[in-house]
């Protein structure tokens, strides 16, 4: 009988590297999705408490844009358009960073955009200095940009299986998997089964987004814009170690796919 060498547990330095490792595993995807969903929920609550806006809710902004264009409320239409444009710009910037680092054969294609999001959250923590309406709009656009970046990063990282700010999509996918499970129980010979791994990730994300929203509501309600700093620290904590220490022998050869 041959002895198997136990797989070494990751060191404290290696753990954040594995979270943003381009060679993905389901446990890494699940852990990173939970962290990012919690941060997104907290930042989304912060957008409401600081700005009166849920900055991850593009469906709401699109609906508001349509309603106010119909009633010729130009100012509110422009505000909604700004939020949508900032979200799309953040997603586009994330894709540019990821593909740029891949072209350079870097192992930082996911660490880089997450670190940039942390930097933008630090900038957002100074939003209290903007007391004018223009300053408020700048803060709103900054947070929408962050939300777009985060959603695009986790979407590309997971191969479009995970979206941390898209609660409607997550709830829809949970419903689909539950429906597949019940149908499989009803018609056992159909071959239809729920994807339990995907369902676990989705439920974990929704609970993380909800928990983050509760913490964010309490944090921003007590500390205001400054509560963005611990959220930024979380994102920088899982990305900066990779930028500083990641080497090919730490994380493998990376993900060659360009999307």
Image: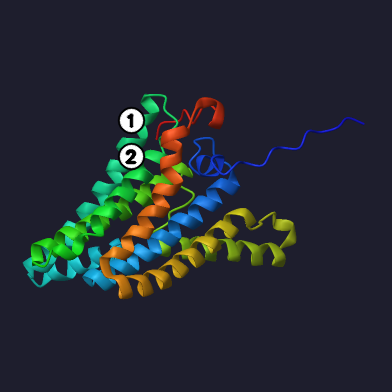
| Residue that mark 1 sits on | 100
| Residue that mark 2 sits on | 95
Relative to residue 183, is residue 117 drawn left or right? Answer: left
Q: Residue at x 55, y 39 (%)?
A: 14
Give the residue at the far right of this rendering.
Answer: 1
Structural distance between the alpha carbons of marks 1 and 2: 8 Å
Relative to residue 222, is residue 183 drawn left or right? Answer: right
Q: Earlier in the sequence, mark 1 or mark 2?
A: 2
Q: Quadrant of the N terminus?
A: top right
Q: Quadrant of residue 225?
A: bottom left
Is residue 169 among the parts visible in the rendering? no
Q: Under tag 1, what secondary structure?
A: helix
Label 1: few (<14), some or many (≥20) within 10 Å?
some
Q: Is residue 245 above or below residue 46?
A: above
User: Measured from the top left, where is residue 101 in percent x and y?
Assistant: 37, 30
Q: Residue at x 70, y 67 (%)?
A: 186
User: Measured from the top left, where is residue 164 in percent x and y?
Assistant: 43, 56
Relative to residue 237, is residue 221 drawn left or right? Answer: left
Q: Under tag 2, what secondary structure?
A: helix
Residue 203: give its label. none
Q: Quadrant of the C terminus?
A: top left
User: Measured from the top left, where is residue 189 in percent x and y?
Assistant: 74, 57
Q: Quadrant of residue 196?
A: bottom right
Q: Is residue 12 above or below residue 108?
A: below
Q: Quadrant of residue 157?
A: top left
Q: Residue at x 42, y 34 (%)?
A: 244
Relative to residue 22, is residue 177 drawn left or right? Answer: right
Q: Nearer the viewer, residue 114 or 122?
A: 122
User: Measured from the top left, where is residue 114 in percent x and y?
Assistant: 38, 46
Q: Is residue 124 above or below residue 15?
A: below
Label 2: few (<14), some or many (≥20) within 10 Å?
many
């Amino acid at each position: 009988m041959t002895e198997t060498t136990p797989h070494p547990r990751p060191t404290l330095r290696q753990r954040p590297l594995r979270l943003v490792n381009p060679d993905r595993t389901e446990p890494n995807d699940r852990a990173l999705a939970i962290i990012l969903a919690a941060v997104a929920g907290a930042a989304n609550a912060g957008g409401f408490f600081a700005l009166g806006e849920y900055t991850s809710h593009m469906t709401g902004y699109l609906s508001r844009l349509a309603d106010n264009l119909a009633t010729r409320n130009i100012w509110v239409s422009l505000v909604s358009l700004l939020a949508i444009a900032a979200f799309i710009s953040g997603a586009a910037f994330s894709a540019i960073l990821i593909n740029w680092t891949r072209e350079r054969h870097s192992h930082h294609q996911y660490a880089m955009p997450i670190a940039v999001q942390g930097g933008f959250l630090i900038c957002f923590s100074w939003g209290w200095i903007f007391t004018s309406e223009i300053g408020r709009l700048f803060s709103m656009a900054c947070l929408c940009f962050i939300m777009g970046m985060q959603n695009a990063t986790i979407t590309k990282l997971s191969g479009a299986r995970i979206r941390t700010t898209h609660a409607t999509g997550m709830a829809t996918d949970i419903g689909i998997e539950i429906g597949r499970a019940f149908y499989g129980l009803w018609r056992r010979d159909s071959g239809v089964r729920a994807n339990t791994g995907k369902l676990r990730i989705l439920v974990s994300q929704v609970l993380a987004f909800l928990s983050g929203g509760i913490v964010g509501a309490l944090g921003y309600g007590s500390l205001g814009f400054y509560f963005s700093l611990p959220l930024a620290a979380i994102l920088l904590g899982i990305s900066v170690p990779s930028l500083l220490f990641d080497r090919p022998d730490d994380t493998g050869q990376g993900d060659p796919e360009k999307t």
